[in-house]
Image (tube, rainbow, N blue to C red):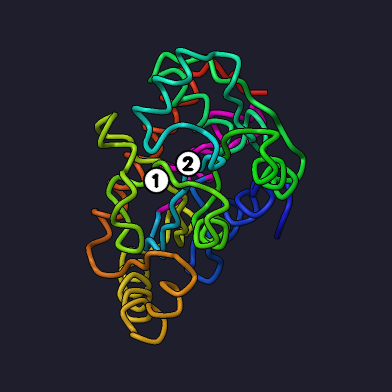
């Protein structure tokens, strides 16, 4: 059930019987929305139990080839010396690219400007044309432009470097603990019996460990998950909830 940034689906699952037959396929927006929207009306850690992480897709900080920087330290040094020459194409202040750009600006002490787009495809086109200097997009959308040499990768937003791009540093190498990739998970409404949660966790992990499934996800630049325990899954989501909540607060966004 699409709409309202995922909130329609989230509310439907929250109200569903706690019998394991209605589940939520959630993204990282699931832990961010309560900090952004006053009408989100759910607590991601109390109203649901996250059963399994499915996959992760990281974002990539990309620059037009003319930007005189090969990595983030060089970019931030250039941005400080030339505060009017670096702008970032974003999908809005309350979307992932906009929030990550604002957080990088704050951490680095730079004053890079933001150019919001209703459609990020237009933002990417403007960076390709050199009208805007930077963009932050998911790796699946970035890889074609990187392969063609039309955009220059400066960093990835996952905690570690990607095997597919071993020479592209993670932002965490400059700012330890920085981990703001996108992810997908399966959650159930709170109150589902432990035996059902355990069964679902095991079945989903078995599917994710199937070579045909994992290889398909990897071919799309998604990092598949599988294994671990229910508690490890919950701990990860709790950490993401805290991290995104801190980011939203630090960049000055208020629920609306």
**Residue 47 part of the magenta-drawn span:** yes
Q: Is residue 24 visible?
A: no
**Residue 174 part of the magenta-drawn span:** no
**Could you tell me which residue is drawn at 43 percent across and 28 percent down?**
75
The quarter in which the C terminus is drawn is top right
Label 2: which secondary element? strand
Q: Dot 2, how many residues are within 10 Å of its Cα: few (below 14), some (14-19), or many (20+)? A: many
Q: Which mark is residue 61?
A: 2
Which residue corresponds to mark 1? 156
Query: Which quadrant of the figure has residue 37?
Result: top right
Q: Position of residue 230 (x, y in %)?
A: 27, 59
Q: Position of residue 131 (x, y in %)?
A: 70, 34
Q: Is residue 10 left or right of residue 1?
A: left
- The answer to whether the residues at label 2 and label 1 have Cβ atoms under 8 Å apart is yes
Q: Dot 1, how many residues are within 10 Å of its Cα: few (below 14), some (14-19), or many (20+)? A: many
Q: Spatial distance from mark 2 to mark 1, Cα to Cα?
A: 6 Å
**Could you tell me which residue is drawn at 60 percent across and 33 percent down?**
133
**Vertical position of residue 134 compared to residue 109: above or below:** below
Q: What's the magenta region?
A: 29-49
The quarter in which the N terminus is drawn is bottom right
């Amino acid at each position: 059930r699409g709409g309202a940034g995922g909130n329609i689906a989230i509310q439907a699952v929250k109200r569903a019987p706690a019998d394991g037959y209605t589940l939520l396929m959630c993204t990282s927006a699931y832990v961010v929305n309560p900090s952004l929207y006053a009408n989100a009306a759910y607590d991601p850690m109390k109203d649901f139990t996250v059963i399994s992480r499915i996959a992760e897709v990281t974002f990539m900080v990309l620059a037009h080839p003319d930007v005189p920087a090969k990595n983030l330290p060089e970019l931030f040094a250039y941005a400080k010396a030339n505060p009017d020459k670096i702008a970032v194409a974003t999908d809005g202040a309350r979307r992932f690219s906009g929030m990550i750009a604002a957080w990088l600006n704050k951490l680095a002490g730079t004053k890079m400007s933001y150019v919001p787009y209703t459609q990020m495809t237009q933002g990417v086109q403007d960076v390709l044309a050199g009208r805007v200097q930077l963009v932050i997009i998911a790796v699946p959308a970035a890889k074609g432009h990187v392969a063609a040499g039309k955009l220059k990768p400066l960093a990835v937003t996952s905690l570690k470097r990607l095997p597919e791009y071993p020479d592209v540093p993670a932002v965490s190498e400059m700012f330890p603990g920085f981990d703001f990739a996108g992810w997908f998970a399966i959650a159930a409404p709170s109150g589902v019996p432990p035996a059902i949660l355990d069964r679902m966790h095991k079945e989903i992990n078995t599917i994710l460990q199937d070579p045909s499934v994992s290889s398909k996800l990897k071919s799309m630049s998604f990092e598949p998950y599988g294994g671990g325990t229910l508690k490890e899954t919950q701990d990860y989501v709790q950490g993401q909830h805290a991290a995104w909540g801190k980011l939203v607060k630090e960049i000055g966004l208020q629920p609306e």
